[in-house]
Image: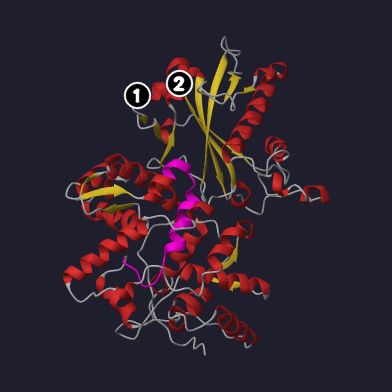
């Protein structure tokens, strides 16, 4: 029987804020992919040297850099691993992210593989969990609990998840079912009982919420970065638009963790090193569900966005919504350019031409400058690069960085057309769609404002290279004409 009073502080590695995690991910991936493979002995210095420019000068100290390398990008995110041949390699998860630019999918895979106990912890912390027979895939359990809460029409708070789940020994040992937890929450609510985690220091003083709740909040932050939950006013609810992934998570709530820590002898240094190496490799590999974790645009954009009422005809169109992610970004930019050019001169809108399906030209859209001056009707060539992330990037953050891949043809076109060649970086986020416009990337590369690396050609840019930011949001509660027009043909808001 579930005894909620048995409490145990089960922590994870401390990370950063949500927006910092979203911002830092491209930087971690950039550095690791650049320097790897490299010898294990060289990796710390190479990582620190390359990564320090993404931090303010006051934080470019060894301790902070080591934390980013070992604790966050290494243990928490599993972005590299040390192989038996003496080299460090970029992980499968890192390589997949660099290919698909799907940040929520990256966090889904992390959340799916998170478990207690694990190889992220220091030895003392790990042994505390092992000694108490803790054994749980905590994120699957949380998702299952939230599905039951929804069925029972009750709201679950962050404090509820902290007290009844992530700090509950019975749950952490898989000795309590989500149904039992829900029943206890309902019972306490009826009796007006509010449970919360309480801890005291050696002098008997109650510890602050930063001690009792911060690790709880961070675990939920990762589930939100994975686009599986939303947090509002201290409460947690499922993102119903991610039903397929939610189902995958929920069905494993009662399964033992995939990596069995209890099979390892942790009594000697050599055995612990063997365990650590095998855990690091395991966590760096993609889960067997990774290919099912791609993020649909319709599931990412916030549900607050108004949507037209579905008709019977709409409901029969579900199987037709197979429009590729890149097509959505190109359609957005195409409509935006027609709208922009029309404001300058309506008769010139026929000069906005989509070339997305034409291979080898080096750009997706041909438009015109459409600004006063002698070059107003000169052609403008636009390459569209779309990405998905939970938070919206902040163009005012001087330390923010992003990466995108461009082909040889696209880089040749950028060199050829110079000031008439632009990249439109389209971000699909929970808050809507935002475009960052980078003009004349060839010149910016020469001025060292962006870095173009001939891998495929990966273009890396930061805030000082952005020429314009366009937020495609709602006006007076109505969908903007650009989004509305695109939404008629592609499933941006999951309407069909």
Q: Position of residue 226 (x, y in %)?
A: 50, 56
Q: Which residue is mark 1?
A: 447
Question: Residue 247 lies in what quarter of the image?
Answer: bottom right
Residue 105 located within the stretch drawn in magenta: yes
| Near-viewer residue (337 or 88) | 88
Q: Position of residue 23 (x, y in %)?
A: 42, 47
Chief secondary structure of the magenta portion? helix
Query: Which span of residues is magenta-colored?
Result: 97-119
Residue 319 located within the stretch drawn in magenta: no
For the point 51% across and 68% down, the residue is: 140
Quick check: 169 above or below 35? below
Outermost residue, right direction? Answer: 312
Is residue 129 shown left or right of residue 277? right
For the residues marked 2 and 1, what is the alpha-carbon distance in whole angstroms?
15 Å
Outermost residue, top direction? Answer: 374
Residue 155, can we see it?
no
Q: Which residue is mark 2?
A: 414
Q: Position of residue 244 (x, y in %)?
A: 60, 59
Q: Which mark is residue 47?
A: none
Is residue 456 shown left or right of residue 494? left
């Amino acid at each position: 029987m579930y005894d909620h009073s048995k409490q145990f502080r089960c922590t994870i590695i401390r990370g950063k804020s949500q927006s910092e995690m979203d911002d830092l991910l491209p930087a971690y991936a950039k550095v690791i992919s650049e320097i790897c493979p490299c010898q294990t002995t060289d990796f710390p210095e190479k990582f620190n040297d390359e990564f320090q420019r993404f931090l303010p000068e006051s934080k470019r100290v060894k301790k902070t850099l080591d934390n980013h390398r070992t604790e966050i990008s290494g243990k928490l995110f599993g972005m590299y691993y040390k192989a038996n041949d003496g080299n460090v390699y970029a992980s499968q998860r890192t390589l997949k992210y660099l290919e698909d630019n799907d940040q929520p999918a990256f966090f889904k895979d992390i959340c799916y593989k998170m478990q207690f106990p694990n190889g992220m912890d220091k030895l003392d912390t790990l042994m505390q969990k092992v000694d108490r027979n803790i054994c749980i895939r905590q994120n699957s359990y949380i998702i299952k609990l939230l599905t039951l809460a929804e069925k029972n029409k009750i709201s679950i708070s962050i404090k509820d998840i902290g007290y009844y789940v992530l700090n509950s020994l019975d749950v952490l040992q898989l000795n309590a079912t989500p149904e039992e937890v829900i029943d206890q929450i309902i019972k306490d609510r009826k009796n007006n009982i509010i449970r919360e985690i309480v801890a005291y220091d050696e002098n008997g003083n109650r510890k602050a919420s930063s001690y009792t709740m911060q690790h709880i909040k961070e675990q939920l932050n990762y589930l939100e970065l994975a686009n599986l939950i939303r947090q509002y006013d201290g409460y947690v609810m499922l993102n119903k638009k991610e039903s397929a992934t939610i189902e995958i998570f929920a069905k494993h709530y009662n399964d033992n963790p995939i990596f069995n820590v209890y099979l390892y002898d942790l009594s000697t240094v050599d055995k612990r090193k063997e365990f650590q190496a095998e855990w690091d490799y395991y966590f760096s590999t993609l889960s067997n569900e990774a290919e099912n974790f791609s993020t649909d645009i319709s599931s990412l954009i916030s549900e607050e966005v108004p949507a037209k009422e579905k008709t019977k005809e709409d409901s029969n169109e579900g199987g037709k919504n197979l429009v590729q992610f890149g097509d959505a970004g190109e359609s957005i930019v195409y409509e935006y350019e027609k709208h922009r050019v029309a404001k300058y001169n309506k008769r010139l809108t026929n000069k906005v031409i989509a070339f997305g399906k034409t291979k080898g030209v080096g750009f997706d859209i041909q438009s015109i400058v459409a600004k006063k001056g002698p070059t107003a009707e000169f052609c403008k060539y636009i390459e569209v690069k779309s990405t998905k992330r939970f938070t919206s990037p902040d163009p005012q953050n001087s330390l923010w960085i992003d990466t995108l891949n461009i082909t040889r043809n696209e880089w040749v076109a950028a060199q050829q057309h110079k000031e008439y060649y632009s990249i439109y970086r389209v971000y699909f986020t929970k808050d809507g769609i935002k475009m960052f416009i980078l003009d004349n990337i060839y010149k910016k590369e020469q001025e060292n404002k962006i870095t173009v690396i001939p891998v495929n050609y990966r273009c890396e840019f930061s805030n000082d290279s952005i020429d314009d930011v366009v937020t495609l949001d709602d006006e007076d509660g109505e969908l903007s004409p650009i989004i509305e027009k695109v939404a008629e043909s592609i499933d941006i808001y999951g309407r069909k």
